[in-house]
Structure formats: C-alpha cells, structure tokens
Amino acid sequence: MDTWVIVLIIVAAIVLVGIIIVGGRRARERQLDNKRSEAAHLRKEADRGTSQAAERASLAEEQAQQAEQERAKAEETRARADEIDPDRNT
C-alpha cells in the first residue's frame, strides 16, 4: 500500500472517531435537556399539588372552626333550654 493511502485511512479514522464523539456528546446533551425539562414539569406539578393541598387544609381548618362554633352554640342553647324547662331536674 502506498503511504498516502495509509495516511488517508488514518485521517478518515480520526475524522470518524471525532464525528462519533461529537455525536455522542450532542445526544447526551439532548438527553440531559430532556431530563431537565421533565424535572421542571414535575416540579411545577408538585408545586401545584402542594398549593392545592394547602388550600384544602386551610378550608378544612375553617370548616372545623365553624363546626366547633356551631357545636358550642348548640351546647349553650341546650344548657339554656335545660335551665328554662320546668320538667328538667337539675
């Protein structure tokens, strides 16, 4: 084989290895970008879920307070009825 053919094969091999390396890096970067995008989407979804849960917890707390107030008022009304009722033994 002539020297120039060997040199040409070596240069072609080096170029091919370079193309493979660059292509691999680009594919890896695309994969990392996709993972970052998916992670950002999941974080948004988690934040939205956390916000909804906080709203529900707040609403539940308000409802619990209202229920407690209604219970206390009912107890006061019952106590007043017991005081007024002449047939009730106190």
Image: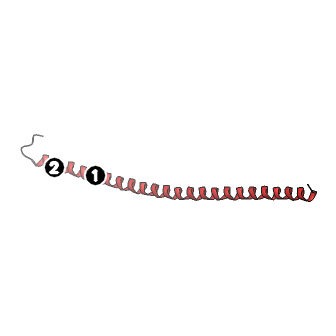
Q: In the image shown, does 77 or 5 lie closer to the viewer? A: 5
Residue 49 occupies quadrant: bottom left
Residue 4 occupies quadrant: bottom right
Q: Are marks 1 and 2 in contact (CB under 8 Å)?
A: no
Decide if residue 69 is on the left or right side of residue 38: left
Most extreme residue toward the front, as rendered?
1
Q: What kind of element bears circle 2?
A: helix
**Kind of residue indicated by mark 2:** Arg
Residue that appears at 18% across and 51% down: 77
Label 2: how many Cα within 10 Å (few below 14, some 14–19, many 20+) = few
Decide if residue 76 is on the left or right side of residue 16: left
- Nearest to the eye among marks 1 and 2: give it: 1
Q: In the image shown, does 69 or 50 lie closer to the viewer? A: 50
Q: Return the x and y of residue 42 as percentages of the image width and height.
A: 52, 56
Quadrant occupied by the N terminus: bottom right
Label 1: how many Cα within 10 Å (few below 14, some 14–19, many 20+) = few
Q: In the image shown, does 10 or 58 lie closer to the viewer? A: 10
Q: Return the x and y of residue 56 as percentages of the image width and height.
A: 38, 55
Q: Can you identify the residue that label 2 sits on?
A: 80
Cα separation between marks 1 and 2: 20 Å
Disc marking residue 88: none
Residue that appears at 71% across and 55% down: 24
Q: What kind of element bears circle 1?
A: helix
Q: How many marks do you count on the picture?
A: 2
**Kind of residue indicated by mark 1:** Ala
Q: Can you identify the residue that label 1 sits on?
A: 67
Residue that appears at 89% across and 58% down: 5
Mark with earlier residue (1, 2): 1
Q: In the image shown, does 27 or 80 lie closer to the viewer? A: 27
